[in-house]
Image: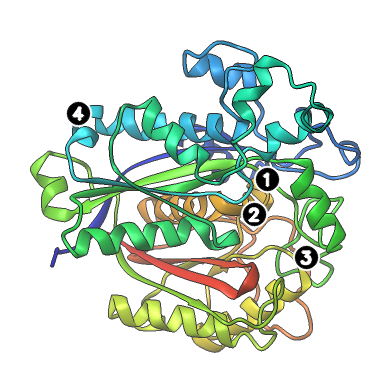
Amino acid sequence: MAGRIVVSAMGIISALGRGAAAHLEALRVGQSGLRLPRHLDTIYAQEYLMGEVRPGNDELSALLGLPAGNNGYTRTTLLALVAMNELVQATGIDTLAQEPLAFINANTVGGMCSVENMYMDFIAGDTPEEYKKYIDTLDCAESTLNIARFFGLKPFMATISTACSSSANALILGARMIQQGLVKRAVCGGCDSLSRFTINGFASLKNVSKTACRPFDRDRSGLNLGEGAGYLLLEREEDALARGAQILAVLTGYSNSNDAYHPTAPSPDGSAALRTMERALQKAKLAPTDIDYINAHGTATDSNDAAEGKAIERLFGAGAVFSSTKPFTGHTLAAAGAIEAIFSIWALQHNTVLPNLNFNAAPADVLIRPATATNHREMNHVLSNSFGFGGNNVSLIFSKA
């Protein structure tokens, strides 16, 4: 059995930019990345704000030294490669090439972003040669395989798809594999890109907002979809110290559960969210009063915010310090758990409560209010929630080393 599992490197790209510096500045000043999409070809392009990453595919390809045009990489994979490259640069490819390594990736839409633009040619049987390389990219594992190939890694690979909690579950699996001695290190995270398939599906559920989302607000009207990728390197504390790595945080607690209440809605009393957070605290051997900040799932939908808000209130009381960061990035689906874990670690490192943008008034059924401004307080432990469709719930706890 391993000792403490630590985070020793991270990589990220979202609507706020790429890399730590761009994100930290946007979070500090409260600058949202939501805007009307420029790259997504959809009838909703002038209707819905989205957390679209600014660079187009050719720009992303250039950052990676890849040719422009149809180079065989979907936008999903390009986003993942840019985020992963930041982690690789911080760690060193030689360290990651040492076996045994696990790469646990999370994804929900695969290469739908590319394939849906080629679909009419596919079904007409008139497929241009340059499109054929995309035919089998719909699989969620397509990005996983291409990331490993791009960086020349030969890890144990797995792809997790549990909706919005996918990359948070990837972190749990990576930590457990290290604890059981199956691998020495694990790169865990997730990626997703915007697609017409996604926006049409969420629009059919009538839970997409045309304006900037308002998590936990009385007048919330739905979520904004986003895209991006985030990856974290997990390893044993002693291994990180032996190679002189900076320890960013300790993964002290985690829990996942499934309430099986409804395909797209959580149990309304918040019991499932409550149970997941309680078990994460038990794993970390902490009390609710030990948690200094909660990065809530906070989608700004009626059902999620009511259930999560009730659960936070029941467990942490009137003094709970929490916020949702989705008004910054939009809901990045499979990438959300990893991106928000990174945000939580930054909050911990900088002793900074991240603001819940666009909040004006609390709903009648939840008494607690999210933090609405960036402020500083001493932090030792933070909790990050990811609650997905189908009742797939994850809570992660990060602590200072």
Q: Which mark is residue 94?
A: 4
| Total labels drawn | 4
Q: How are the residues colored?
A: rainbow
CB contact under 8 Å: marks 4 and 3: no
Which secondary structure, mark 1?
A: loop
Q: Residue 6 is drawn in which quadrant?
A: bottom left
Circle 2 crowding by C-alpha within 10 Å: few under 14, some 14–19, many from 20 = many
Q: Compute the Cα span from label 2 to label 1.
A: 9 Å
CB contact under 8 Å: marks 2 and 1: yes
Which secondary structure, mark 2?
A: helix
Circle 3 crowding by C-alpha within 10 Å: few under 14, some 14–19, many from 20 = some
Q: Compute the Cα span from label 3 to label 2.
A: 16 Å
Q: Which mark is residue 360?
A: 3
CB contact under 8 Å: marks 4 and 1: no
- In the rendered image, residue 141, in percent from the top left (x then y), is placed at 50, 44
The residue wearing badge 2 is 326
The residue wearing badge 1 is 226
Circle 4 crowding by C-alpha within 10 Å: few under 14, some 14–19, many from 20 = few
Answer with left or right where residue 367 lies relative to residue 144.
right
Answer with left or right where residue 77 lies relative to residue 359.
left
- In the rendered image, residue 317, in percent from the top left (x then y), is placed at 53, 86
